[in-house]
Image (cartoon, helix red, strand yellow):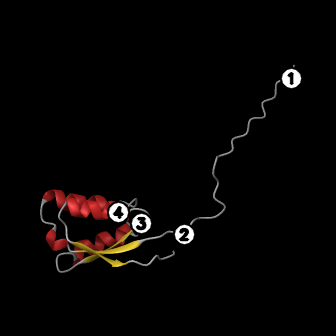
């Protein structure tokens, strides 16, 4: 009886190339975020999991957010959750671009 150790690991799904990254743009009015929980929620949104180019968006919030709205570039499949979080926190927002963009 011959035993072989020819076990190879093959993942179930291997993408042949990187898939395109879809995103939506939201204009968030930061003057409506004045409570601690609202500000912490906006800080949580700066995670790279939610927002494309989080560092630039954070700098824009920091310097321009007091005077006007800030554009958030939300990543793929996070639109619904982003909208629900903004509604639950009573932060004013509107969807700027409904078209799909490729990056």
Q: Which residue is mark 4?
A: 80
Q: CA distance from mark 4 to mark 3?
A: 11 Å
How many residues crowd mark 1 within 10 Å: few (<14), some (14–19), many (20+)? Answer: few
- Outermost residue, top side: 1
Kind of element beneath mark 2: loop
- Which image quarter is the N terminus in? top right
Mark drawn on residue 20: 2
Q: CA distance from mark 3 to mark 1?
A: 52 Å
Query: Which comes before the other along the chain, label 1 or label 4?
Result: 1
Q: Which residue is mark 3?
A: 75
For image coordinates 37% across by 62% down, the residue present is 50
Q: What is the x, y in percent for residue 103? A: 51, 74
Q: CA distance from mark 1 to mark 4?
A: 56 Å
Query: Which comes before the other along the chain, label 2 or label 4?
Result: 2
For image coordinates 39% across by 61% down, the residue present is 48
How many residues crowd mark 2 within 10 Å: few (<14), some (14–19), many (20+)? Answer: few
Query: Which comes before the other along the chain, label 1 or label 2?
Result: 1
Query: Which comes before the other along the chain, label 3 or label 1?
Result: 1
Query: Which comes before the other along the chain, label 3 or label 2?
Result: 2
Q: What is the x, y in percent for residue 32? A: 15, 70
């Amino acid at each position: 009886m011959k035993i072989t150790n020819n076990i190879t690991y093959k993942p179930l799904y291997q993408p042949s190339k990187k898939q395109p990254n879809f995103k939506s743009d939201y204009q968030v009015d930061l003057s409506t975020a004045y409570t601690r929980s609202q500000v912490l929620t906006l800080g949580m949104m700066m995670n790279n999991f939610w927002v494309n180019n989080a560092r630039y968006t954070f700098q824009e919030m920091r310097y321009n957010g007091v005077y006007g709205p800030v554009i958030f570039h939300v990543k793929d499949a996070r639109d619904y959750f982003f909208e629900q979080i903004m509604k639950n926190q009573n932060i004013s927002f509107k969807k700027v671009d409904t078209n799909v963009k490729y990056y």
